[in-house]
Amino acid sequence: MALTTNDASARQPLPNGSAPNGPDGVAEAAPIHPVLEFWYYFSENKGSVAGLFIVLTLITLAIFADVIAPHLPYEQYRDHLLQPPAWQEGGSWEFILGTDPVGRDLLSRLIYGTRESLFVGVIVVTISLTVGVSLGLVAGFFPGILGTAILRLMDTILAFPSLLMALVLVAILGPSLTNAMIAIAIVLQPHFVRLTRAAVMAELSKDYVTASRVNGAGIFRLMYITVLPNCMAPLIVQATLSFSTAILDAAALGFLGLGAQPPIPEWGTMLSEARDFILRAWWVVTFPGLAILISVIAFNLMGDGLRDALDPKLKRS
Amino acid sequence: MLKFILTRIGLLIPTFIGVTIISFTFIRLLPGDPIELMAGERGIAPERHAQLMAQFGFDKPIWEQYLVFMGRLLNGDLGVSIVTKKPIFDEFFTLFPATLELALFAIVFAVVLGLPAGIIAGVKRGSVFDHTVMGISLTGFSMPIFWWGLLLIIFFSGILGWTPVSGRISVLYYFEPVTGFMLIDTLLSDEEGAFRSAVSHLILPAIVLGTIPLAVIARQTRSAMLEVLSEDYVRTARAKGLPPSRVVGLHALRNALIPVITVIGLQVGVLLAGAILTETIFAWPGIGKWMVDSISRRDYPSVQGGLMLIAAFVMLVNLIVDLLYGLINPRIRYAR
C-alpha cells in the first residue's frame, strides 16, 4: 500500500510565467519540454532528489562493486574473526566496518549485496508490472466474466497477508533467491492489475479511443499503444514503491532462511547469519539492516516525488 | 443498513471460496508426491505409502478431494498436524490468543502515538514538528522490522538489561491458561510478579510490530487532517469565532477520522504478516512462529490450515471495518 501526502496541492506554476501544458493551462510562449517540466516538479521535493541520489549511488556501487569493494565478498580472513569496525578498539582500517563470524569483510559484503537487492527489485518489478498490466488491460477491456474472474482472483490473493503468501509460495517452490523473487512478484502484481484496470476504465470512454477503434485498430493496438501510455503515471509510481517492497520482502525471506541462501551476500540473509552474535558483535547486525533501511527509504522517497511530479491528483494506489 | 450488510457479506463469498481453493491447491502443487515429501529423506514403505494416500484422500480425483475438504472445513475440521498429530484447528486456536494479544497491543501503541502525532503535524503543517513526524514516519514505513527488533534487543535487553529477550513470560511462572491472554491470565493467577513479567515480555514485540502501522497511521491522519482543514465548513467554524481547539478537535477531527479508521482496519494484514517476523525474533509462541516452524518441519497440512484461517480472519476484520465505515459514514451506506 502506498502512502499519501497532500503536499501535491501546493503545486506552483513554472517560472518565466509559462504555465505547463495541463488541462487548464494553455502555453503562452514556447511549450516547455516535458522532461524539464517533470524535473521541475520532481526537484521541488527535496526528499525525492535525495532519494534519487541514493538510488544512483546504489546503482554505481552495484555496477562497480569489483572495483570499489576493498575485499572479495567470500574471502575469509581466519585471523580476523568478528573484528570490530575501524573506529573501535581492536578494529583496523583494513576492515572498515569490521568482519563477520567467519572473517569476511562486512563492508565488501554490503557493497556486493547492493547487486542482489537491486537485482531482486528489477526482476520483481519487471515480472509483476508485465503480468499485472496485461491482466489489468484484459480486465479493463473485457469487463464481463473474464474481467470479473481476474479481479476476484486478485482479491483472493490480496486477502492473504503478503509476506505470508510469499512465505508459503517459497515453501512450495523451495528456498532460493529466484523463487523468493517469483513469490514476491506474484504477491505484488494484484496492485498493478487493479491500478491498470481502473485507469483503463477511465480512458475507454474517451474520444481518442473511439476514434482509434473506428479507424480499425486491433485489440492489441488499442490496449498497448492507444490506451496504455495514458495510464502510465500511476503505474510508474506504483513500480517505484513496489521496488522498495520487493527489497524489503526479499530481505525478510532471506532473514527467515527462505530467500537467498548463504554464503550469498544478501542483506537479509546476512542478518539471519548474524543473529546469534547480536549481543557480542553489534556491527554484524547493525550495518546490513541499515543498508536495507536506507535503500528502502530512498525508493520510497523517489516514489513520493514521482507521484507529485507525474500525477498530483493521484492520492492512493 | 441490513441491505448494506448483506451486500458486503455477499461480496466476500467468492473471495472466501477463492481462498479455500488456493489453500487447497497449494498442498497439491508441491513437486512430487505429498506423502513422500512429508516422509522426507528417510523414505517410506510402499504399503504405508498407499495407506497414507488413502488416509489423506490423495487417491481420489481432485474435485472430489476438494468437496471432501470443503465438507470437513464447514464442520471445523482441518485435519491433523503431521508432527504433533493434534487437530490443526485446536493447535491454531491455542496459539491464536498470543498473536491476538501482541497485535492488539501493537495497534494500541500505533494509534496512541500515531493519531496525535498526525493531528498535530497536520495542524502545524510545515513546522519542525511536522517535518520530524514525517521523517520518522517515512523511516518507520521503510523499516525492516526484523532488524528493528534485533536493534531493540541489543539496546534494551543487551545494554540496559531492562527487558527479557524472548518468550511471553518468565519460566519461573507456570499456570494453566484460562483465556489464553497472558495479561489477563497473570492477573487471575494471583502469582506475585507474574503480571509484571508478562508486561515486560510484551513491550518490545508490541513496539516492533506496531512500528509500520504507527508510520502509516501518522501519515494518513496528517493527510486527512490537511484535507479537512481546507474545507469550507472549517473556515465557517473559524469565522464564527470558535476556539481553535474546538474547530480542530470537534469539527475537523470527526471527519478526518473516517478514512483513518479504514486505514487502521487495513493494518490487520500488515500486523499478521509482521507477526511472522516479530514472533520469530522474540520466540513469541503465536501463529506467526507456528507457521514458520510448520514450514520448516514440512508440516504441510498445518501450513494449509493456518494459511486459510489467517486469510479468513483478515477477511472478517476487513468486513467489520467496512461495516463500521458504513455506520459512521452515511454517504457510503446510501450510495449503494
Image: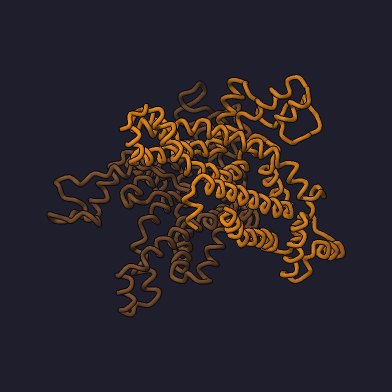
Residue A67 shows in this picture? no
Q: Residue at x 78, y 57 (%)?
A: B75
Q: Residue furthest left?
A: A29
User: Toward the viewer: B315 or A52?
Assistant: B315
User: Toward the viewer: A49 or B74?
Assistant: B74
Residue B93 shows in this picture? yes
Residue A93 locus on image (x, y percent): 44, 28
Residue A64 locus on image (x, y percent): 39, 46
Give the image quarter of residue B133. Answer: top left
User: Toward the viewer: A190 or A169?
Assistant: A190
Relative to A31, say whether A254 is above or below.
above
Color style of the picture: by chain
Report the side of B245 relative to B11 (left or right).
Answer: left
Q: Residue furthest front?
A: B240
Relative to A230, say whether B84 is above or below.
above
Q: Residue furthest bottom?
A: A216
User: Which shade is chain A?
Assistant: brown
Residue A109 locus on image (x, y percent): 49, 40
Residue A119 locus on image (x, y percent): 46, 52
User: Toward the viewer: A305 or B321?
Assistant: B321
Q: Residue at x 58, y 27 (%)?
A: B154
Report the side of B84 relative to A33 (left or right).
Answer: right
Q: Residue at x 53, y 34 (%)?
A: B110
Q: Residue at x 74, y 66 (%)?
A: B67
User: Which shade is chain B?
Assistant: orange
